[in-house]
């Protein structure tokens, strides 16, 4: 029988509560060429919602995912349905103008109502509840920013107010609210959409990696196995676009990871959805668990493949929970990755100006429930009508001198730094130094090599050179993955791709004890 100490212990391996609490069907991989109206790549909220909208238009749709459905960022979200994306509206007004800031708010607000209307239409049981959203700060440096954000709310007609307290027992300097937002169980919602589209003729293929688009009379999605999806339109909703069409998206976005723990607390959750303005970020919401209440505590963002041991980020969230809530039981822990564009507005629309038949959606900055839904609405409108009232704001080919130029320089300077750092890194470790369930970088026959020794003592060796553009991956102990610090590609212990931009696995090496570990 488990004692209280066992219940309060952090789970050894990461697994999303959302995925653990829903039965997700499996689908076969694509084994032959097919013809459809629209080929969609990516089985998250954008791909599934786009398929749902297009099926309702009467179009023939195929949805491809390189792995399992809902196993990417959507399956590892905090699942806040809100247009309050941190302190963003004053910044948008300053850089893009009041009209475009209003477009951003309206787009995300309409996404909230779309989700609510869809839930009502199909009577979906997904724990949807209306909640106010709050950004709070405990730092004097952010009080002025909070005041400016409130003025931005007033200019844009956003319902909100300033206050100076949160119901968590710690002091804050300022709090800004946005009224009538929402939260839900994202996979219960999306599984209802999956059932709808399959019942109405959509085809879903898992473990089918799209690697390219060939343009002839019709676009052809090419899979790693050489199969083709021949269609009129292609939608790249694969987190990082599997096809960039010379749009150089790897140089115009940067990846960040963040972490989440789900616990039963000693205190009752007071309601609302919260996030801190300053770093390290602390995000809070509730969820239901077998009739009981969970606290979901997230934060600790950092550039993918960079920084301290990823286990320390989980530990920091645990310490926060123990200090302010008290942990009765640890239910699960997981992490997620998302991309941020140069101006913090997603890229939604034609992949390049001269390739209108290929549409992309990416760069949600960790606010994928509304941005991802809005992207699906926009893409469906572009396919049906050829236009959307807010398409200029999200146009992927846009480039603003302010703030894009400065951010572009920062992103790519960091990439150059990480590439050089990885190539020159020295290590004195050998394979024999690696303990069970640990990974690290060693030199094997003089070559930088990634080593993971599993719990059975079996050694897994990979070439640490990322197959995207040649940066050197680093070990992520918290999630047992190899992560690229340049553009965010992630790989399993055996080198298989978890997420792009890389499309090719890391090279694997056979381990011969006593010969190669030097």
Image (cartoon, rainbow, N blue to C red):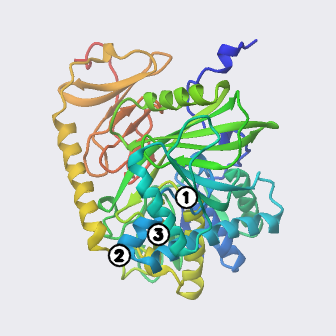
Side of 479 where 408 appears, left or right: left
Q: Nearer the viewer, mark 3 or mark 1?
A: 1
**Are the residues tagged 1 and 2 within 8 Å (C-beta)?**
no
Label 3, on which residue? 360
**Are the residues tagged 3 and 1 within 8 Å (C-beta)?**
no
* Residue nearer the viewer, 298 or 333: 298
Question: Where on the picture, by quarter, is residue 32?
Answer: bottom right
Q: Residue at x 38, y 25 (%)?
A: 439
* Residue nearer the viewer, 381 or 66: 381
Query: Badge 1: how crowded within 10 Å, few (<14), some, or many (20+)?
Result: many
Question: SS class of the residue under badge 3?
Answer: strand
Q: Nearer the viewer, mark 3 or mark 2?
A: 2
Q: Is residue 39 visible?
A: no
Q: Which mark is drawn over residue 86?
A: none
Question: SS class of the residue under badge 1?
Answer: helix
Q: Is residue 436 visible?
A: yes
In the displayed structure, would residue 283 be above or below residue 105?
Answer: above
In the displayed structure, would residue 262 be above or below residue 147?
Answer: above
Could you tell me how far apart the alpha carbons at marks 3 and 1 are, in whole angstroms?
A: 14 Å
Q: Where's residue 106, x and y in %?
A: 57, 74
The C terminus, quarter of image:
top left
Label 1, on which residue? 368
Could you tell me how far apart the alpha carbons at marks 3 and 2 are, in whole angstroms?
A: 14 Å
Side of 398 where 286 appears, left or right: right
Q: Residue at x 73, y 35 (%)?
A: 268
Q: Residue at x 60, y 74 (%)?
A: 377
Label 2, on which residue? 398
């Amino acid at each position: 029988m488990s004692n209280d100490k066992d219940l309060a212990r952090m789970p050894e391996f990461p697994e999303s509560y959302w995925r653990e609490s829903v039965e997700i069907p499996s689908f076969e991989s694509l084994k032959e060429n097919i013809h459809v109206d629209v080929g969609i790549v990516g089985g998250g909220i954008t791909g599934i919602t786009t398929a749902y909208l297009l099926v309702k238009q009467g179009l023939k749709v195929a949805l491809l995912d390189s792995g399992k459905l809902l196993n990417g960022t959507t399956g590892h979200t905090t699942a806040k349905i809100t247009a309050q994306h941190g302190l963003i509206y004053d910044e948008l007004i300053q850089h893009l103008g009041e009209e475009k800031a209003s477009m951003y708010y309206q787009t995300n607000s309409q996404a909230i109502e779309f989700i609510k209307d869809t839930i009502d239409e199909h009577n979906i049981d997904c724990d949807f509840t209306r909640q106010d959203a709050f950004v709070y700060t405990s730092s004097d440096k952010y009080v002025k920013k909070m005041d400016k954000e409130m003025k931005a709310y007033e200019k844009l007609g956003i319902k909100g107010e300033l206050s100076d307290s949160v119901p968590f027992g710690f002091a804050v300097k300022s709090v800004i609210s946005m009224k009538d937002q929402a939260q839900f169980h994202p996979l219960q919602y999306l599984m209802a959409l999956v059932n709808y589209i399959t019942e109405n003729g959509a085809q879903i293929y898992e473990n089918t990696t799209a690697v390219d688009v060939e343009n002839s009379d019709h676009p052809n999605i090419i899979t790693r196995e050489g199969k083709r999806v021949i269609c009129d339109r292609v939608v790249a909703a694969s987190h990082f676009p599997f096809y960039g069409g010379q749009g150089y998206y790897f140089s115009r976005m940067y990846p960040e990871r963040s972490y989440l723990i789900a616990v039963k607390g000693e205190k009752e959750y007071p309601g609302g959805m919260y996030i801190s303005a300053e770093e390290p970020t602390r995000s809070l919401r509730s969820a239901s668990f077998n009739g009981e209440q969970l606290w979901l505590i997230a934060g600790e963002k950092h550039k993918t493949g960079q920084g301290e041991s990823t286990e320390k980020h989980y530990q920091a969230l645990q310490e926060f929970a123990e200090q302010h809530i008290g942990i009765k039981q640890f239910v699960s822990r997981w992490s997620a990755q998302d991309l941020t564009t140069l101006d913090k507005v997603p890229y939604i629309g034609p992949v390049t100006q001269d390739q209108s038949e290929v549409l992309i959606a990416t760069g949600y900055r960790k606010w994928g429930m509304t941005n991802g839904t809005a992207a699906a609405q926009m893409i469906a409108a572009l396919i049906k009508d050829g236009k959307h009232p807010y398409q200029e704001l999200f146009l992927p080919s846009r480039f603003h001198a302010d703030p894009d130029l400065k951010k572009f320089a920062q992103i790519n300077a960091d990439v150059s730094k990480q590439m050089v750092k990885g190539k020159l890194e020295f290590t004195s470790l050998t394979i024999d130094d690696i303990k069970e369930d640990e990974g690290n970088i060693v030199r094997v026959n003089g070559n930088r090599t990634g080593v993971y020794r599993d719990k059975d003592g079996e050694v897994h060796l990979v070439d640490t050179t990322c197959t995207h553009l040649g940066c050197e991956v680093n070990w992520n102990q918290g999630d047992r993955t190899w992560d690229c610090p340049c553009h965010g590609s992630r790989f399993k212990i055996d080198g298989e791709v978890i997420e792009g931009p890389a499309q090719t696995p890391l090279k694997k090496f056979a381990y011969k004890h006593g010969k190669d570990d030097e």
